[in-house]
Image (cartoon, rainbow, N blue to C red):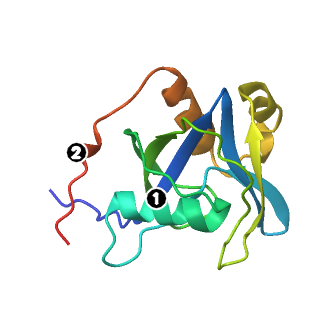
Amino acid sequence: MDHEYLPARLTVAALVHWQGRFLLVEEAIRGELRFNQPAGHVEAGETLIEAARRELKEETGLEAQPTAWLGNYLFKPADSEATFLRTALVFDLHTDPGLHRPEDPDGDVLACHWFTLAEIAQRRAALRSPLVWQCIQDYLAGTRLPLCALQAFI
C-alpha cells in the first residue's frame, strides 16, 4: 500500500498565563490584524523548549521557563499548501511580568496583550488559527504533560 508523504513545518507556541489572563500577540497577516500565542518556526539546532523560549522573547520581550508541555497540534490551513505541526508549551508565570514589548526581528508583531478568556472569545474571529483557541481550551481543561517527554537529539 502506498502512502502519501505529509511534509510538515515544525512550529512552537507559548501559552503564557498570569492571574487569569493569557498573553497574545497582535500581528499583521496579509493586511489583516490577527491574534496568536507567541509562536514561530523551530530553527536549526534548537530544541523545542529553546525555540519556544526564543519566540517568547522575540515576540514579547519576556524571558521565562516553560512549566509544562500542552501538546502537539497538526493543522492544515485551507488557504495554504503547508501543514503545520505545532508543539505548544505552557508558561505559567508566578511573578508580575512587568512592562514588555516585542523585540521581533521579523517585524510581524505589532503589540502584546494580556486578555481574559472573555476578551479572547470576543476576538475569536480574529485569531490566527483555531489552534489558539484549542490550546487555551486544553489549558483550561487541565492538560499538562511533562517537559521531560520532549526529547531532542540534535
Q: Are marks 1 and 2 in contact (CB under 8 Å)?
A: no
- Numbered mark located on residue 52 in the image: 1
Identify the element where label 2 is drawn: helix
Label 2, on which residue? 148
Q: Nearer the viewer, residue 133 or 8?
A: 133
Quarter of the image with the C terminus is bottom left
**In the figure, 41 relative to 143: above or below?**
below
Residue 73 on image: x %, y %: 43, 45
Q: For this rendering, which residue is in front, 131 or 5?
A: 131
Q: Residue at x 31, y 64 (%)?
A: 47
**Residue type, mark 1 in image:** Ala
The reply to whether residue 123 is in sight is yes
Q: Position of residue 111 (x, y in %)?
A: 79, 59
Q: Position of residue 45 (x, y in %)?
A: 30, 77
- The reply, left or right, for residue 62 in relation to residue 83 is right
Q: Quadrant of the N terminus?
A: bottom left
Which residue sits at x=62%, y=50%? 37
Q: Residues within 10 Å of mark 1 (few under 14, many from 20)?
A: many
Q: Residue at x 67, y 71 (%)?
A: 103
Q: CA distance from mark 1 to mark 2?
A: 15 Å
Camera-nearest residue between 73 and 135? 135
Answer whether residue 40 is visible to the viewer in this image. no
Q: Quadrant of residue 136?
A: top right
**In the figure, is residue 27 to the left or right of 65?**
right
Q: Left or right: where does residue 144 sit relative to residue 100? A: left
The amino acid type of the residue labelled 2 equals Cys
Q: Earlier in the sequence, mark 1 or mark 2?
A: 1
